Every structure is written in C-alpha cells, then in structure tokens.
C-alpha cells in the first residue's frame, strides 16, 4: 500500500512494468527518429531562395490562448507526473493535482470554442480519399521534404490541417485528452465517482497515456519546424497568421 495520489491505495510500485518499458522505448525511438530526420533534411533538402510569404489568418486569439495554456499544462503535468511515479513528492503531487484540474477546465474551454466559433470543423475527417491523402502526406514527410518538394496540402479557411495533422490532433483532443482527464479524476476522486476499486488501474492508465502524450509532443514539436524555415509555422501560433512560401501558394 502506498500514498501516491493523496490517500493510501493498493498500488504496487512497479516502476518499470513491461508496458511502460515499451512506451519509454517508443518515446526514445521517436526522439531518435526526429533527430535523424532533421539531420537528413539539413544535408539533403535544397536551400530555397526567399521568395516572399503568403499569410492567411487562421488561428483566432481564443484558439491561441488555449494552445499556449495547454502547452504549459502539458509541460507541468508531464514533469510532475513522471517525477511522482518514480519518487512522489507532496509538493509535486499537489502541483500535479492543481494543474490537472486546470487542464480539465481548459479542455472544456476548447470544446466550447469549437462549438461556438466553428473551429471544430477543422477536426472533421473526410473519409472519401482518406487513405490516399494520408499516404501522400506521409510520403512527403519521409521523402518529398528531403528533395525540396512543395507541401502536398495547403492550409485554408475550410481546413487548416494536413491529413496527418488532422488525424493526430483529433485523436489528441477528442481521445487522448479525455482519457487523461477521466483517469486523473478517477485517481483523485474514486469514491465520488463510485469506482473506488478502480483507483490503482486509473493511475496506470493515466501514466500510460501521459507517456503517449509525450511521444505526440516530441513529434509535434519537430513537425512545427517543417515549414519553409524553422520558425515559419510557429509564428502562426503567436500572431494567428499561417505562413507559407509564395511559390507554394495555389
């Protein structure tokens, strides 16, 4: 029995169970993969001459506020959550609990934005031709970007994400984040939810999806560098304008 979530629970502190080892290896492989991809880009991708930028306002202030709040919360939650798994600290546990509750509120805020501003349309996946679009985008990231080919899909007011982004973001927002929120709340308030016997399982599910979110963040941060230059895509989340080279404007 161990006190890890504010009360004593029947939880054996198996710090490196097989499933966590597998997820940790996947995270390490993801990090190594993006590092290798970056080096290949630097060596193989032809240098482009500046040809001006086309700018399109796609990221409203409410969306940008959510994005940066969410990024901050993920950083705090991952740092405190993983640290608490291997050596719980009362202060870090409390910080994790507070940040987790704010995380739930911020997620609800985002859902409200999606409903009332129309931002949710960007997460609706069109099934017609879906496989072909995914393959085309994947081939661009694997090979086309190394040859300096133009991006196969362009952001627009009707869809600001390419196919892989759309699948990943929809999965994160509507699957991963709710699982993190529900498992975290169940770990904190099992009696209130009438599932006291599920607390230990909730902790494990919460940790597993926390590591999965880390894998996503590694890939997400790297792909944010895949514009015409390193910070081109990042600027959009600062001032709201998506940028792409004028030569790629269709």
Image (cartoon, grey):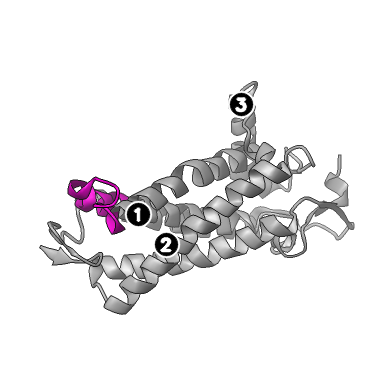
Q: In the structure shown, which secondary structural element does the residue marked by tag 3 occupy?
A: helix
In the picture, the disc for residue 100 is 2
In front here: 189 or 51? 189
x, y percent for residue 188: 30, 59
Queried whether the magenta region covers residue 24, the answer comes back as: no
x, y percent for residue 230: 69, 63
- Eye-nearest disc, 3 or 1: 1
Q: In the structure shown, which secondary structural element does the residue marked by tag 1 occupy?
A: helix
**Hey, which quadrant is residue 154 in on the image?**
top right
| Precedes in sequence: disc 3 or disc 1 | 3
Queried whether the magenta region covers residue 201, the answer comes back as: yes
Label 3 crowding class (10 Å Cα cut-off): few <14, some 14-19, many 20+? few
| Precedes in sequence: disc 2 or disc 1 | 2
In the picture, the disc for residue 130 is 3
Contact check, label 2 and label 1, Cβ < 8 Å = yes
Residue lying farthest to the left in this orientation: 1
In the picture, the disc for residue 185 is 1
Left-right relation of 12 to 60: left
Query: What's the magenta region?
Result: 187-205
x, y percent for residue 182: 37, 48
Residue lying farthest to the bottom in this orientation: 91
What residue appears at the point 54 percent right and 43 percent down from the top-left corner? 168
Label 2 crowding class (10 Å Cα cut-off): few <14, some 14-19, many 20+? many
Instruction: Confirm whether residue 88 shows in the render.
Output: yes
Give the distance between the C-alpha atoms of the residues marked 3 and 1, in whole angstroms.
35 Å
| Precedes in sequence: disc 3 or disc 2 | 2
- 25 relative to 92, above or below: above
Q: Please state, as top left, top right, bottom left or bottom right, where the C terminus lies in the image.
A: top right
């Amino acid at each position: 029995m161990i006190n890890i979530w504010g009360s004593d629970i029947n939880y054996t502190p198996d710090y490196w169970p097989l499933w966590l080892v597998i997820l940790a290896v996947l995270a390490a492989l993801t990090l190594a993969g993006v590092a290798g991809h970056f080096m290949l880009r630097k060596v193989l991708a032809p240098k482009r001459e500046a040809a001006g930028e086309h700018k399109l306002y796609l990221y409203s202030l409410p969306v940008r506020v959510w994005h940066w709040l969410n990024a901050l919360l993920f950083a705090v939650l991952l740092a405190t959550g993983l640290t608490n798994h291997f050596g719980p600290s009362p202060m870090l546990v409390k910080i994790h609990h507070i940040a987790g509750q704010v995380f739930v509120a911020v997620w609800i805020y985002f859902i409200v934005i999606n409903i009332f501003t129309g931002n949710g349309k960007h997460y609706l996946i069109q099934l017609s031709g879906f496989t072909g679009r995914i393959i085309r985008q994947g081939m661009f990231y694997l090979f086309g970007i190394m040859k300096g080919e133009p991006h196969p899909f362009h952001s627009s007011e009707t869809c600001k994400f390419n196919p892989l982004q759309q699948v990943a973001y929809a999965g994160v927002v509507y699957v991963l984040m709710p699982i993190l929120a529900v498992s975290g709340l169940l770990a904190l308030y099992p009696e209130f939810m009438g599932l006291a016997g599920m607390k230990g399982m909730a902790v494990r599910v919460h940790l597993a999806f926390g590591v999965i979110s880390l894998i996503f963040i590694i890939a997400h941060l790297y792909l944010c560098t895949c514009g015409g230059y390193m910070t081109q895509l990042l600027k959009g989340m600062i001032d709201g304008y998506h940028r792409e080279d004028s030569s790629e404007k269709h």
